[in-house]
Image (cartoon, rainbow, N blue to C red):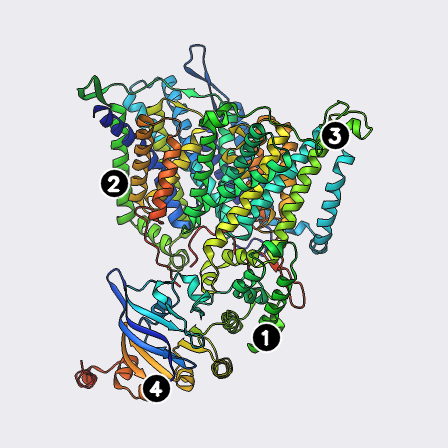
Amino acid sequence: MEYFVQQLINGVTLGSIYGLIAIGYTMVYGIIGMINFAHGDIFMVGAFLALIAFLVLVALGVSAVPLALFIVLLVSMALTALYGWTVERIAYRPLRHSFRLAPLISAIGISIVLQNYVQVAQGARVKPLPPLVHGGYTLFEGNDFAVRLSHIQIIVVVTTLVLMAAFSFLVARTRLGRNMRACEQDLKMAALVGIDVDRTISLTFVIGAALAAVAGLMFLLYYGVVDFFIGFLAGVKAFTAAVLGGIGSLPGAMIGGILIGLIETMWSAYFSIEYKDVAAFAILIIVLIFLPTGILGRPEVEKV
Amino acid sequence: MPNDVEPAHPRLGAFAAAKEAALAALVAFGLFALMVGIRTEQGPTGALIFTTRFALLAEIVAAVFVGRFLWALIRRNANISIGRFVPTSAKTAVLGIAPYAAAAFLAFALIVPIIFYGNRYLLDLCILIVTYTMLGFGLNIVVGLAGLLDLGYVAFYAVGAYSYALIAQHFGLSFWICLPLAGILAAFAGMLLGFPVLRLRGDYLAIVTLGFGEIIRLILLNWQDLTGGPNGIPGIPRPSFFGLPFNSSEHGFAATFGLSYSPTHRIVFLYYLILALALITNWVTLRLRRLPIGRAWEALREDEIACRALGVNTTTTKLTAFAMGAMFGGFAGAFFATRQGFISPESFTFAESAFVLAIVVLGGMGSQLGVAVAATAMVGGFELFREFDQYRMLVFGAAMVAIVIYRPRGLVATRTPSVWLREHKDIPAVIVRDARTETPA
Amino acid sequence: MSAPPILTVEHLTMRFGGLVAVSDLSFCARVKEITALIGPNGAGKTTLFNCVTGFYKPTVGRLRLDHPHDNASFLLERLPGFRIARDARVARTFQNVRLFAGMTALENLLVAQHNPLMVASGYTVLALFGSPTYARAQFRAIDKARYWLERVGLADRADDPAGVLPYGAQRRLEIARAMCTDPVLLCLDEPAAGLNNRESAELNAFLRALRDEHGISILLIEHDMGVVMEISDHIVVLDYGVKIADGAAHDVRNNPSVIAAYLGVADEELAQTEAEVGL
C-alpha cells in the first residue's frame, strides 16, 4: 500500500513533466495541424540552457537556491522561447501552405539539427548536476516502507498546476487566447477577420517552447542529469500523451501526461522496468481502438 | 513590400538592411550565448565545470550579421530567386529526359560492380544505397501510394532481419527459403499493425505506427532469450552462390568458376542480390499500380470517403498496403542480416524510419525514380559529409530542412497515371493529395 | 398502379447529441422513378442521404432496399458503408464534389469498377503475372468508362486530371463515376448546383435517359425548382427534419405548408397560415 502511494506520487510528478511538454505539442497541432517533431528537442535545449545558466550563476556568486532557480527559470524560458520562435520562422513558416508531409520532414530535420547542435556544442557525455533542492516530507510509514514526498516533487507539481491555470486563463479569457482558438477553428477565416495569423502562430510556438523550458528545468532538478538524447524519448512520450488525451485539447494533454507518467512508473515498479515504454505505447494503442480521437478528443462526425 | 519596383536607393537600402542584420545578430546572440559561449565539461572531481568560448561566439554572431546584411542588401536591390539562375530551357530539358533518366540510372546500377570492382568501400556504399532504395520502394507503397503516414517502418525491417537470422540459425535453411519466410512474417507484422489503426486519422495513425516501431525495438532489446538482447544475434550464415560458398576452398565459388579467390566476389554477389530484390520490388509496385488494388490505394489517398461510396473495402485495402509494404521491408531486412552476418537492435531505431520516410517524401510521393534518386543523394550525401566529422549529422539535418523547403513536393513533381485512353499526360504534383495528417474534410 | 418500391424509409430518426436532424421520417421511393427530396437548408436532406448511403448510422428506423430484378432485399442501416455500394448497389454523389483530384477522369471511373476488376484479377494474385481474364476485364471496364464519359460529354477529357476540370464537368464526372458502379439506386446530392439554364436542361435530359433507358431509380436532393418540377415523378418535402409533404409534383407545388416553409410567412398572416397548415 505504501509502495503504491509512493509510485503514485512519483508517477504524478513524472506525468506533470510530460504534461508540460504535451501542451506544446497539442497547441501547435491544434492551430496548424502540424506534428512538431522537434518539440521534444526544444525541451532538451531548455534543460541544457537551465544547466548552463545554473553554472554561470554559481560562478557569478549567486548561491541562494531560490533566487538562482528563479533567475534560471526566467532565462531558460526566454531563451528557449527564442529557439522555438526561430525554428518556426526558419523551418515551418515557409511550408505553412505546403502539403502536409513537408513540415513533418522539416521538423525531423530540425530535430536532428538540434540534437547534434547540442552534442557538438556541449559534448556527447551526460551532464550531471548536484541536487539543488534537498529534503522533503515523510508522509507516513508502514510495512518497513516510508512514503516520501520530496520538495522537488512538490515544486514540480505546483509549478505545473500554476502554469496550467495561467495557461487556461490565457486561452479562455485573453485576446491572444481568442485569436488562438479562432485560428484553430478556421485559419483562413481568422485571417480574413483581421487576426494576425503569423503572429498568433509564432506566439503559440513561443509559449509551447517556454512551457517545454519549464519542463526541462523540472527534469534537470528532478533527475539531476541531462544529455542530448533526452529530447527524443520524452518528446515521443509527450506526444503520445497529447494523442491519448485527445490532440487539440489542453486538459487532455495534461491528463494524458499524468496517465503516461503513472503507467510508466507503475509498470516499472510492479512488472518490469525494461518494458515500461512498451506499456505506455500499448496502452495508447488500446485506448485509440476504443476511443479513436483520444480521451478528451472531440468525437469525429464526418462532414460528408 | 515590393522590392523590385522602387529604384535602388543605396543609402536607405543599406540602413534598413543593417537594421535587419542587427536584429538577426541579436537573435543569434540570444540563441548561441549560453550554448556556444559556454562549454560544460566534467571536471576532475566529477562535478561540472565550464570554460568560455566568447571568441567563437563573437565570430558566429558577426558572421550572422554580415551574412544577413548582405542577403538583405541583395534582396532589396535585385529581384533574385534561385530559380532564375536556371534558364527555362534547362528546366524543360530536365523534365523531358525523365524517362531516359530512369533507364540510364538502371544501366549504371547494373554495371556498378564492374566499374568499382577494386574499391570495396564504394561497393559497400552502393549496396547501402540500393538497400535504402528498396526500403524506400516498400514505404512508398504505404505512404506514397496509399497515403498512410507510417512512422515506424523500421519495425518491418527489423522483423525481417531477426526472422531471417533466427530461422537460418535454428533450422539451417538456405537463404532462398528463409528470405520469403522472413517476408511473410514481416507481412504478418504489417497486418498486425494495420488492424488497430484502421479507424485512425492521419496524425493518430502516425503516432501509433511510431509506437509500434518502438515496441518492436524494445522487445528485441529486452527479450534476451529469443533475440540476444543488446548483444544481438551473431554468426548469421553468409550467403552462398546457390550452394557454393564464397570461400577459398575447392568447393567454393572461386574454384568452381576457375577464378582466383577474392573476398570481393561475395560483395559483388551481395550487390546484385540486393539490386535484384530492389528491381523486383520496383516491378511489383509498378504492376500493382496498374491493377485494381494499386488504383484503390491511390484513391484511398485521394479521398477515403469517396472510396467507400464506390464500394471499395477500405479496410482490406489499407491492410493490404501495410502488408505489402511490410513484406518488402522484411525482404530488405533479411538481406541486411545476411550481409552483415550480425544484427542488433541498434540498427533499428526511429532514426531509420525517419530516414526512409525522408527518402520517400524528398523523392516525390509515389514516384519510383524519385525514391531511387533521393536514396542515392541522401545516402551518398551522408557519406560525402564524412569529412565534417561530428558536424556531419548537423549538416545532414540542415540539408534535409533546406531541401524540403525548396522542393516541398520532392524531386519528382509529377504523378504518372496508371492508364490512359489517348495520351499519357503526367499530372502536376500540386493537384495530387498526399498522406494527410487530418481527417478528410 | 404504382411501381414497386425500391427504397423504403420507415420511421427514420437521426439524432446528433441533442440535435434532431431527421425526425420520424417515412417515405417510399419507387423503381424507375425520379424521387426528389426538397426543403429549406438544414432540413435534413443530406443527413438522410448519409443514412441511406451508410455514412451515418440512424438512431432509429429502418431503410429497406429492394432490388427490382432479383428480389434481393437489404437493410441499409445494418450494412457497413462500402457494402451498400457494392452489394445493395446504391451509388451517390456528394454536395461538395468528391473526385480523386490527382487521378485522371478515366482512372476515376476505373476505381468505380474496383470490385468486378478485383475479382477478375484473382484478387491481384493472378493478374500480377498477366492473366488474360484480367486483361479482358480491364478492356471491358475501359469500354464502360468510355461509354459513360461520352454520355456526360467528357470523352475528350478522359486523360485529364479530375482536379483541373471545370466545376460543371466535375459534377458530370461524378455522376458518370457513380454510374460505373452499376447501381440500381442513384442518389444525387444537388446535381444542378452551379449549373446554368442550358446545363440544367441537359441534366434533366440526362437523368430522364438514365431512368428510361437504363432503368435506374433516382433519389435526388435539389434546390433548383426548375429541375425538380420538370423531372420528378415524386417529391418529398422536408422542413426541420420532418416530412411536410409527399406526392406528385403538382400536388406539392400547391401545398400551403410547402409554400410557407420555403417562402416564409408575413407576421400578419402567421396565425392564418398556421391554422391552414394545421399547427
- Amino acid type at circle 2 is Ala
> Which residue has dot 3 on it?
B265
Residue assigned mark 1:
C147
Which of the 4 image quarters holds residue B248? Answer: top right
Q: What residue type is labelled 3?
A: His
Q: In this view, does B432 lie above or below B103?
A: below
The residue identified by callout 2 is A165
> Under tag 3, what secondary structure?
helix
Question: Mark 4–mark 3 contact, CB under 8 Å?
Answer: no
The residues tagged by marks 4 and 3 sit, at their Cα atoms, a distance apart of 84 Å
Q: Residue furthest right?
A: B258
Could you tell me how far apart the alpha carbons at marks 2 and 1 are, in whole angstroms?
Answer: 64 Å
Q: Is residue B50 visible?
A: yes
Label located before the other in sequence (4 or 1)? 1
Q: Quadrant of the C terminus of chain B?
A: bottom left
Which dot marks residue C248? Answer: 4
Label 4: which secondary element: loop
Say which element carries label 1: helix
Q: Quadrant of residue B335?
A: top right
Residue A97: x and y in percent read 49, 53
The chain letter for the residue carrying disc 2 is A
Q: Residue at x 43, y 40 (%)?
A: A85
Q: How far apart are marks 4 and 2 (CA)?
A: 62 Å
- Amino acid type at image mark 1: Tyr
Calculate the distance from the C-alpha at mark 3 to the C-alpha at mark 1: 58 Å
